[in-house]
Every structure is written in C-alpha cells, then in structure tokens.
Amino acid sequence: MVESPVKPLFYLFGGHIEVSGADGPASRTSDGVRFVFVGPEGVAIDAERRDEPVPDGLPSMQLWTEIEVAAKLRAQPVMTVFAHYRETGQLGQIELVRLDSDTHFLVAGRLV
C-alpha cells in the first residue's frame, strides 16, 4: 500500500479514513467532500452532511448512513436494504463504527 500524504482522520479496521482523492471505498457528500477508506478490502463507508434533510421514512440521518454502508457491503440496492430493515429492524451481521463530527455523519463498516 502506498502511503498517502493526506493526514488520516480516523484509524480503524487496519486502515484509515481521510479526505482525499485516493483509491478505495469512498463517499462524497453533497458539498463535494470525498471521504475515503485507505486500507484492507471489505470495508465500506458513508458520509452525509449534518444539515442534509433526512430521507423520507427514516427517523435519522445516522440510520441512513448505516443502511448505505450495509447496501455497499452486500452489493445490494439501498432501497432493498432499507425494505429489509423496515421489516426486521436489523441490518444483519455488520460491524459498524460511527465517526460523526460537528459537520458530518460518518460511519464505516465491514461484514462479520
């Protein structure tokens, strides 16, 4: 793995999250900020600005980011994962780590 010149924001799952154009699983917010996980395969991330409206039918943007990560990890449409969550109240066997800041909701996850 080539070291990134960008300062990591968080270390987790044997890698780190940074704001950059580096290769790896990424999430771009509506204002163009690109969060990327640099590290081993099998990790997904999602980021949303705190001032974004909550999607219809969801109680919180935090839950939306978790559903997005589950969809990425399972390679399923987000609405399929959302429908499953509405029926079961669960996202399945996923380890999630919340990394929220004052400006963004950010979550990383991997299948367990």
Image (cartoon, grey):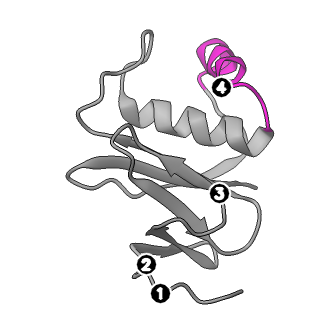
The residue that appears at 64% across and 79% down in the rendered structure is 14
Q: Earlier in the sequence, mark 2 or mark 3?
A: 2
The span from disc 1 to disc 2 (Cα, nearest Å) is: 9 Å
Q: Which residues are magenta?
A: 75-89
Q: What amino acid does circle 2 point to?
A: Pro
Q: What amino acid does circle 3 point to?
A: Pro
Choose top left, top right, bottom left or bottom right for residue 69: top right
Where in the figure is residue 82, as x and y percent of width and height? 62, 20
* Residue that label 4 marks: 78
- Helix or strand or loop: what does disc 2 sit on? loop
Where in the figure is residue 42, as x and y percent of width and height? 76, 60
Where in the figure is residue 85, as x and y percent of width and height? 62, 21
Q: Earlier in the sequence, mark 4 or mark 3?
A: 3
Q: Nearer the viewer, residue 33 or 54?
A: 33
- Residue 5 got which mark? 1
- Helix or strand or loop: what does disc 1 sit on? loop
* Residue that label 2 marks: 8
- Helix or strand or loop: what does disc 3 sit on? loop
Q: How many marks?
A: 4
